[in-house]
Image (cartoon, helix red, strand yellow):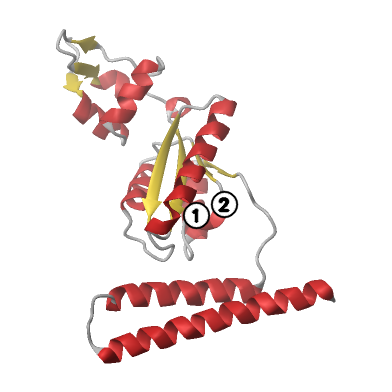
């Protein structure tokens, strides 16, 4: 019986990844196409792709920042995840997102959830827990547990206090609300945004002062 061969785009869809990642895996010798033309077109054996067991699934590193001004931090997360996984000898794919931790519609997050639900990853690695979501991270971790997907958080650190978490959540809500009103030229909306920002800054300052006082005590 002849093998059913598909091009790299369809092969990537079957594995829940991208053509670029498949090319990288070819260079490292992890997944080799069944045939490659002189022009460079790659063909993959469907039966071989579908028979990959869990040990062959990639480790996925997830990195996220909230705004464009934090892109340097996004690259630092990317480099840290790559270095950590390389040191472990894991085949890795990095998913990067730019958006609020309260936004559930980010492209990278949707891709990650799709891979988890299809059980197409072996483990999930993040630099910090809050890189995933502000609310709902525990639900994603439960889905990973059900699917037998390992979760690794490189920097666990000390958990934030109730007041710190509250301040972060309030500031996050203000950020989301402000972005929805952004672009409106009415003086009423501008005054509302200014008032929200002032209240958010005051709350952050109060929390910081409270922490300083506790440290001195």
Q: Which mark is residue 166?
A: none
The answer to whether mark 2 and mark 1 are in CB contact below 8 A is yes
Give 66 or 159, whichever is nearer the viewer: 66
Residue 128: assigned label: 2
Direction from residue 158 to residue 82 in the image, left or right = left
Pointer 1 residue? 131
Q: Is residue 192 in view from this perspective?
A: yes
Q: Crowding near pointer 2: few (<14 within 10 Å), some, many (20+)?
A: some
Q: Is the residue 42 above or below the residue 174 in the image? A: above
Total marks in image: 2
Quadrant position of the C terminus in the picture: bottom right
Residue drawn at 20 percent across, 29 percent down: 9
Q: Quadrant of residue 56?
A: top left
Whole-percent x, y for residue 168 in the image: 54, 71
- Residue at (55% x, 24% y) in the render: 89
Q: Residue at x 33, y 46 (%)?
A: 111
Q: Is residue 51 visible?
A: no
- Extreme residue toward the bottom, this view: 188
**In the picture shown, does residue 127 fall above or below 134?**
above
Instruction: Left or right? Give the position of 191 relative to 196.
Output: left
Q: Position of residue 11 (x, y in %)?
A: 24, 27
Q: Residue at x 51, y 52 (%)?
A: 141
Residue 139, position as x, y percentages in the image = 48, 58
Front-lying residue, 31 or 97 = 97
Q: Residues within 10 Å of mark 1 (few under 14, many from 20)?
A: some
Q: Secondary structure at mark 2?
A: loop
> Extreme left residue here?
39
- Against 58, residue 116 (above or below) is below
Numbered disc 1: secondary structure = helix
The CA span between labels 2 and 1 is: 6 Å
The quarter of the picture where the N terminus appears is top left
């Amino acid at each position: 019986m002849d093998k059913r061969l598909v091009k790299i785009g369809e092969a990537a869809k079957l594995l829940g990844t991208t053509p670029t990642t498949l090319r990288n895996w070819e260079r490292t010798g992890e997944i080799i196409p069944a045939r490659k033309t002189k022009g460079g077109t790659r063909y993959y054996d469907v039966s071989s792709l579908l028979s990959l067991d869990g040990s062959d699934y990639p480790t996925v590193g997830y990195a996220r920042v909230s705004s464009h001004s934090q892109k340097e931090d996004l690259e630092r997360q990317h480099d840290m995840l790559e270095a950590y996984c390389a040191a472990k000898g894991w085949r890795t794919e990095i998913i990067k997102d730019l958006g609020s931790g309260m936004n559930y519609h980010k492209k990278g997050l949707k891709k990650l959830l799709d891979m988890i639900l299809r059980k197409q990853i072996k483990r999930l690695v993040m630099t910090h827990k809050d890189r995933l979501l502000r609310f709902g991270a525990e639900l994603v971790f439960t889905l990973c547990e059900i699917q037998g997907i390992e979760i690794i958080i490189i920097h666990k650190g000390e958990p934030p206090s109730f007041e710190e978490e509250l301040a972060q959540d309030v500031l996050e809500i203000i950020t989301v609300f402000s972005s929805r009103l952004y672009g409106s030229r009415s003086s009423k909306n501008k005054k509302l945004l200014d008032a929200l920002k002032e209240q958010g800054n005051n709350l952050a300052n109060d929390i910081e002062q409270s922490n300083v006082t506790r440290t001195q005590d």
